[in-house]
Amino acid sequence: MTSLILIEAGPAGPSPDLPAQIATWLDSWPIPFTSLEEAEAFLGHETWTRTLVRRGDGWHPTWDRTTIIDSVSELATTAYWEQRSRITCPTLLVQGEHGTMRPEEPSMMLTHRPRTQPVRVPDAAHDVHLDQPTRLHEAIAAFLRD
């Protein structure tokens, strides 16, 4: 591996409340959505509406709630600092200004791996690629040029 790019991701763990938080968020969705416009207004991005499917009573997600929650269960119980310490390639760490990484995690990542280049993208939350795609592209392009 010649380089690694992390976007709103780090080794922090454990986060025992994560599955319940995601379940609560998913359960808050007003399913079915009556229109794609309603879905976009609720979800915040048109991109999210592309995963919806129209049924007789409205628009539904195509994902399975249990699968989504199960997929984050390991993150809720495991920290990956040891694995991260074995990474030797240059790393770009992209954070949204209003992202979900723990406040201390990026500085801890820099302490443990000085070859990590941090970038904080203004006006972006966890979905940096949706909130600020141009700024994300610019950050990645600059990293890959260096």
Image (cartoon, rainbow, N blue to C red):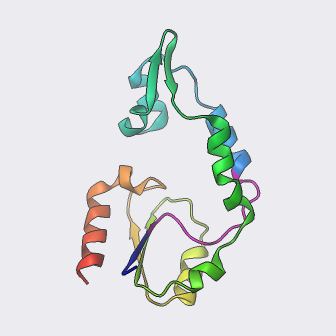
Task: Residue 15: name its quadrant.
Answer: bottom right
Task: Residue 32: name its quadrant.
Answer: top right
Image vertical order of residue 87 relative to residue 46, above or below: below
x then y, percent, for residue 103: 59, 70
Which residue extends farthest top? 56
| Left-right relation of 36 to 140 | right
| Left-right relation of 38 to 71 | left
x then y, percent, for residue 97: 45, 63
Q: Is residue 129 magenta?
A: no
x then y, percent, for residue 60: 52, 23
| Residue displayed at 63% across by 50% down | 71
Image vertical order of residue 74 relative to residue 141, above or below: above
| Residue displayed at 39% across by 24% down | 37
Image vertical order of residue 30 relative to residue 146, above or below: above
x then y, percent, for residue 67: 64, 41
Q: Is residue 11 magenta?
A: yes
Q: Tag count in the figure?
A: 0
Q: Nearer the viewer, residue 118 or 140?
A: 140
Q: Overall secondary structure of the magenta stretch?
A: loop
Task: Residue 28: name its quadrant.
Answer: top right
| Left-right relation of 35 to 68 | left
Q: Quadrant of the N terminus?
A: bottom left
Give, as a single range, the part of the protein colored magenta.
6-18
Q: Quadrant of the C terminus?
A: bottom left
